[in-house]
Amino acid sequence: AQRVTQPEKLLSVFKGAPVELKCNYSYSGSPELFWYVQYSRQRLQLLLRHISRESIKGFTADLNKGETSFHLKKPFAQEEDSAMYYCALTTSGTYKYIFGTGTRLKVLA
Amino acid sequence: DGGITQSPKYLFRKEGQNVTLSCEQNLNHDAMYWYRQDPGQGLRLIYYSQIVNDFQKGDIAEGYSVSREKKESFPLTVTSAQKNPTAFYLCAVGGQPMGAFFGQGTRLTVV
């Protein structure tokens, strides 16, 4: 069965420090992976997709099939990055999105 | 904002009552989803629908029911069989490769 693991419930970093939110998945085929973010009192929103290889708000994520990981990174954290982050997986040909348990990022001044 | 409307925002249910949560979209997406969000457990899939008049159970469908009579609408009924219904419920639409887009959510509380 497909599974997404986010090992950290809470990650606290200082402003300007690098950030890495971990995401590991289990799936034997070719997954499609996403990062979603939920700011306080806002709806859950898509941050980035691995197929786009894009950088959004300074965040990037690279799919590592060998390590089955899709870690989210940002070189310099900002206070406005404080939010709940979810990693999600879907597989080609299905419509199911499987989410991890989320990591709360706190950026300290 | 986003074309996905969930209502109501807050809902209170008495023990033994069925309640229905509304999800409407004007984004013209075929796929729609219902998730339950609990602290520390992330988002768990309740039901999803790929097309009108068709839907599939997710991982935690027991105690819930859905219908998909129109493309724009995917209501979720929380029945009295759901033992622990107090949670935040999220509706989403969309699919690959763009990703899913979420509504604002409904917070259901059993009183």
Image (spheres, helix red, strand yellow):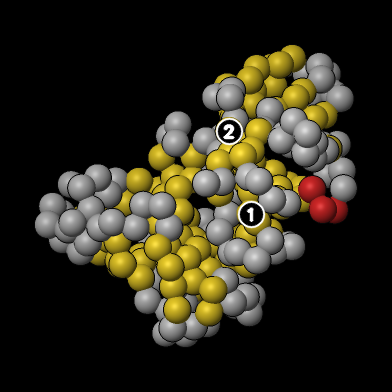
Q: Which residue is mark 2?
A: A5
Sooner in the amino-acid sequence: mark 1 or mark 2: 2
Above or below, comparing residue B9 to residue A75 in the picture? below
Q: Which residue is mark 1?
A: A90
Residue B33 seen in this snapshot:
yes
| Dot 2 amino acid type | Thr
Image quadrant of residue A39? top right
Q: Is residue B103 left or right of residue B68?
A: right
| Dot 1 amino acid type | Thr
Residue B6 drawn at (x, y percent): 46, 64
Q: Is residue B28 left or right of residue B61?
A: right
Image quadrant of residue A40? top right
* Foreground of the two, B62 or A91: A91
Residue B6 seen in this snapshot:
no
What number of labels is visible?
A: 2
Chain to which the residue tagged by mark 2 belongs = A
Above or below, comparing residue B52 to residue A82 in the picture? below
Q: Is the C terminus of chain A in the top left, top right, bottom left or bottom right quadrant?
A: top right
